[in-house]
Image: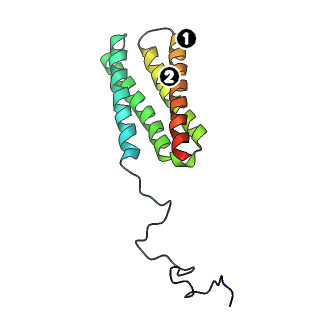
Amino acid sequence: MPTHSIMPGHHPGHEGPGPVPRGTRLRGAEHPSRLSWAVPLTGAVALGLYAVLLSGQNGFTTAGSWLMGIAVALVSGGVGYVLIRERKKMIAEVRAGAFGALLGCSMGFLYSLSGDSVLRSIEIGLLLGLGMGLASYYVFYSHEH
């Protein structure tokens, strides 16, 4: 008889092919953790409230500033949720670039609400996004390798 038999019963630790019993946790079939929605929600609330503050100080009406804050919170929270949920499907470079882009766009937009020039807002967004992307890449690469 060959050493590597595929017949069941020859290897006591392995049952061979067949159905998986109910309740067995499969690799990759994890339930979403609380962090997958708590972190984007916290960031969205903070960005939304800060957008309300900045837009209220720079000529928006009360209703307009609250609508701006709600829009900022919904967009940033939605993008953040998708990034957190799908992060394991992305390679480290793409993941770091996505997190850097999210932070850079968010901070550049908030800076533009303060009333400064568009060029300065783009500069702030690019610098913060690049810094976040590089820091994220370092963390992701060091934890994977």
Q: Position of residue 93 (x, y in %)?
A: 60, 38
Residue drawn 56% across the image and 49% down it? 89
Vertical position of residue 16 compared to residue 88: above or below: below
Residue drawn 56% across the image and 80% down it? 16
In this picture, residue 38 sits left or right of residue 1: left
User: Which residue is at the far bottom?
Assistant: 1
Q: Position of residue 138 (x, y in %)?
A: 53, 35
User: Which residue is at the far front?
Assistant: 3
Q: Secondary structure at mark 2?
A: helix
Pointer 1 local density, CA inside 10 Å: few below 14, some 14–19, many at least 20: few
Q: CA distance from mark 2 to mark 1?
A: 14 Å
Q: Position of residue 88 (x, y in %)?
A: 53, 48
Q: Secondary structure at mark 1?
A: helix
Tag of residue 128 = 2
Observer-nearest of 90 and 10: 10
Residue drawn 44% across the image and 67% down it? 25
